Amino acid sequence: MVLTMQEFEFISWLQAQHVLTRPDIRVGPGDDAAVVMFAGKPLLVCKDLLTEEVDFRLVEAGEYAVGRKAMAVNLSDIAAMGGRPLWALLGIVAPPGTNLTELYRGAMECAAAHGAVIVGGDTNGWSSGLVLSVTVIGEPIREAVLRSGARPGDWLMLTGPVGGSIFGRHLNPTPRLREVVTLLDHVQPHAMIDISDGLGQDLSHLCTASGCGVVVEAERVPIHPDAVRLSNQTGRTPLDHALTDGEDFELLFAVRPGDGSALLEQQPIPLWHIGTFTTPDHGLLLCNEGTTAPLPRRGWQHRFGDGQ
Ligand code: ADP
Ligand code: MG
């Protein structure tokens, strides 16, 4: 079969297949993790794949860092659901010569640092690049925070500076699990997503799921020093990198304005208020030095067939 759909087209198609769903499936494909009921309690389940030369260069990063990244990006999806991780499964498809124990150690230590345990997996060999598949099961700390709950008037908040992760942060992301525990002590966000593919693109997923528009205020966006460094090489603005580079794994979330201003005052965790949700007819906008333009939504997307 020739694949001609792009990643997000396929995910939309998948969501449509789940219209007739079972009562134990509260959230199917389309959020950072699925929410399923088991023994009367909600569980969070997610999987992310990492592929050599797409997500990492094994010769540069080494097995330990690659194992750690594979676990961290999955734990980030649990954080984005307002959850805590419990168990993980590690799938490995490795070429000859791969240091499997270092790979496992990276994944295991990352899981342990966040209270999760690898309880199984599978290991296969082949002659192509290293592929890792991690599944994490967790539970909501309070109620699962979905992508779909933002409302017009909500504040859009961000947990850290973004852009230029290619300089190394992309290999060692910090899943914002501790921050989420503290955040949920203070407020119940209406909606949340982690930034894996780019702020603009991931925000657009959140807006689509919530049926909202948004205005991002450029001067409020915390720009990472790496984005400035990268802009010197690319000629693009640091802001453009902050809005479109992926793999920062900071959290973007929606809260009531009153909750947002209380959070800003108390700063229980690092937080930035970068915009406001609107009704959907306004679209996704970037307000920069008094001018308003469409929010850049370029970002990472896996492409297949024609789109390559
Ligand atoms: P994230 O960047 O948060 O990991 P993705 O963009 O990878 O999210 O995936 C978005 C949603 O699509 C998730 O809910 C995921 O489970 C679902 N999804 C992606 N690929 C598949 C697939 N092959 N089968 C079923 N669901 C999928
Ligand atoms: Mg995610």
Image (cartoon, helix red, strand yellow):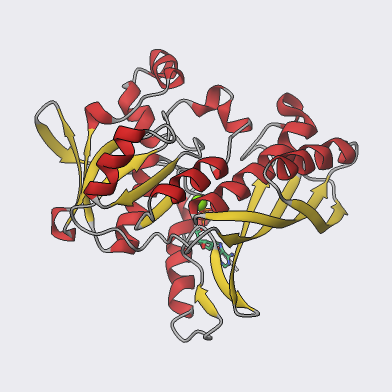
Residue 303 visible from this viewpoint: no
Please tell me which residue is depicted at 62% across the width and 39% down the height of the picture.
55
Please tell me which residue is depicted at 62% across the width and 50% down the height of the picture.
74
Residue 67 picture quarter: top right
Left or right: residue 100 compared with residue 276:
right
Residue 129 picture quarter: top right
Please tell me which residue is depicted at 18% across the width and 59% down the height of the picture.
280
Seen as rendered, the residue at the extreme left is 290
Left or right: residue 251 compared with residue 39:
left
Q: Position of residue 87 (x, y in %)?
A: 73, 58
Q: How many marks?
A: 0
Q: Position of residue 307 (x, y in %)?
A: 45, 52
Residue 24 visible from this viewpoint: yes
Is residue 302 depicted above or below 40 in this figure? above
Q: Position of residue 305 (x, y in %)?
A: 52, 55
Is residue 74 depicted above or below 280 in this figure? above
Q: Position of residue 249 (x, y in %)?
A: 51, 39
Left or right: residue 141 compared with residue 62:
left
Residue 73 picture quarter: top right
Which residue is nearer to you in this view: 222 or 94? 222
**Which quadrant of the rendered structure holds the N terminus?**
bottom right
Which residue is nearer to you in this view: 133 or 267? 267
